[in-house]
Image: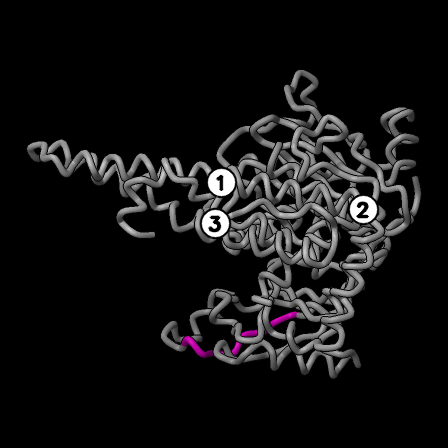
Amino acid sequence: MSEEEQQIPPEDANAPINVKVVSATGDEVFFKIKRSTKLSKLQGAYANKVGKDVNSIRFLYDGARISDTDTPASLDMEDNDTIDVMVEQVGGCVPCSS
Amino acid sequence: MSAQLLLTVSNMNYMGQHFAALSTELDDQFYANHLLRIKQLLALGNELAALPALQSTFDICLESHNTVPSDRVVLGTFHNLRHLREKVIHLRNFTETTFYEVLDRDPVWTEVKLRSMVREIRLNQKLLEGKLPNISFSDFKTLGAREWLNDEVINYFVKKWCSRSSTLGLSTFFACKVLFDDEDNSCIQAKHGVLTLDDEETALRWCRRADKSLCLNMGWDSVFIPINENRSHWYSAYIDFRRKRIHIYDSWSETCLLNQRKPVLLRKNTGLMLVLMWLAELLGRERGEEVQLKNAPLTQWVCDPHTKVPFQPNHFDCGVHTLWHLQHVLAFREVQGEGCLSNRLMFTNNMVGKRLRLAQEMLDDCGL
């Protein structure tokens, strides 16, 4: 583990990192992206892969919404970090069980 | 305002001249006039907000020079402006309260107004696109009459209202990620047993990120958590470190009343309360304060899994109630029922007036 880390020179700020995208149902998709690449690219690729409209799903990093201009660098993401994918929530009444 | 006016403003009926009484008959004119008046008073109030700082600077100057006759004039002007500021604040409160009361009193008119507002934006959806983070027309329209609110709308207001406040307002996804166990994020089965270090780390990461995005600098002393149950119901939880309380607020009367009568272990929200107690201990440590709730029968904390709050008499308003829970805890540190002293924040049987206010607030934020 520590040997691997040492292989990446610290000045290489743009070394690609692995990002795990986890859906609400626990399905995982892995991506390798550069720290300077906009995450919107990853969002589009993910939506394509799972066959969903990118506007219908929400991408969160540590619970905060990922915006179109965010990159792994701007969010201080680290190797093997997780992005959560959530779907729309609505509510009006009918709690499941009283 | 002219210099002459500044010297004499308290003697003149400045407010009366510029802000004549508005008609209280509810129609489109009433609506537009009140909106405009509130905006004007807000702008004027903001201009005058610099006053106290300005005056204290002047006071310091006064101490370090010999008195000259013009000092008296300046002090007189300050006095007048202070007086004016008080009047502006008073009139704005009065105007807002009247406005909201009149809307609440006539839900039929208010619903028609809300419908026409949503229709207008529907015809021109571009007006909304890209103006507010993550809000498009399909989200905005969930504020419409009898619609079910969606997560984007709830998250928009939680973030806006909790920014720079003393309440850590969390996203609607926090509960399904951290507090519940269901595979499909339906928030039905609360986590139980021993919560792992992974759970702790996730909770802390989410809370730290929220603290940052709300610009709270760890200055919060309470936490608000909106919860979506089974993609059909909104309710909320509130942890108050100052008053040492944890509440779960649910506007669905049956859930509250039936469970209040049950033995503690059989109540619907007992499992969730146990997780919230764990969270309170965890976030207590994060705040640098010792909160001991587990195995602590002598604790001063009060934990109520079914706190009585105003109920929704319909099948669509729980989202608005949930946002109103937040309004109340921000204003009163609790949800107030019939005894609520603030007319503008009081819950109403028909929340359509609140919907219209929320929709208007969003349009105002878009600059429309």
Tell me whether marks 2 and 1 sit on the same chain.
yes
What's the chain of the residue with tag 1?
B
Q: For marks 1 and 3, give the one nearer the viewer.
A: 3
- The residue depicted at 59 percent of the width and 37 percent of the height is B222
Q: Amino acid at mark 1?
A: Ile
Left or right position of A65 against B276: left
- The residue depicted at 8 percent of the width and 35 percent of the height is B65
- Near-viewer residue (B106 or B10): B10
What's the chain of the residue with tag 2?
B
The span shown in magenta is A13-20
C-alpha gap between disc 2 and disc 1: 26 Å
Image quarter hosting the C terminus of chain B: bottom right
Residue at the disc numbered 1: B89
- Do we see residue B298 in this rendering? yes
Residue at the disc numbered 2: B106
Place of residue A62 in the rendered image (x, y in percent of width and height, measured from the top left): 60, 59
Q: Is residue A78 above or below residue B223?
A: below
Residue at the disc numbered 3: B18
Q: Within 10 angstroms of label 1, few (less than 14), some, or many (20 or more) residues?
A: some
Place of residue B127 in the rendered image (x, y in percent of width and height, measured from the top left): 64, 75
Residue most extreme to the left = B66
The verdict on residue B60 being magenta is: no
At mark 2, the secondary structure is loop
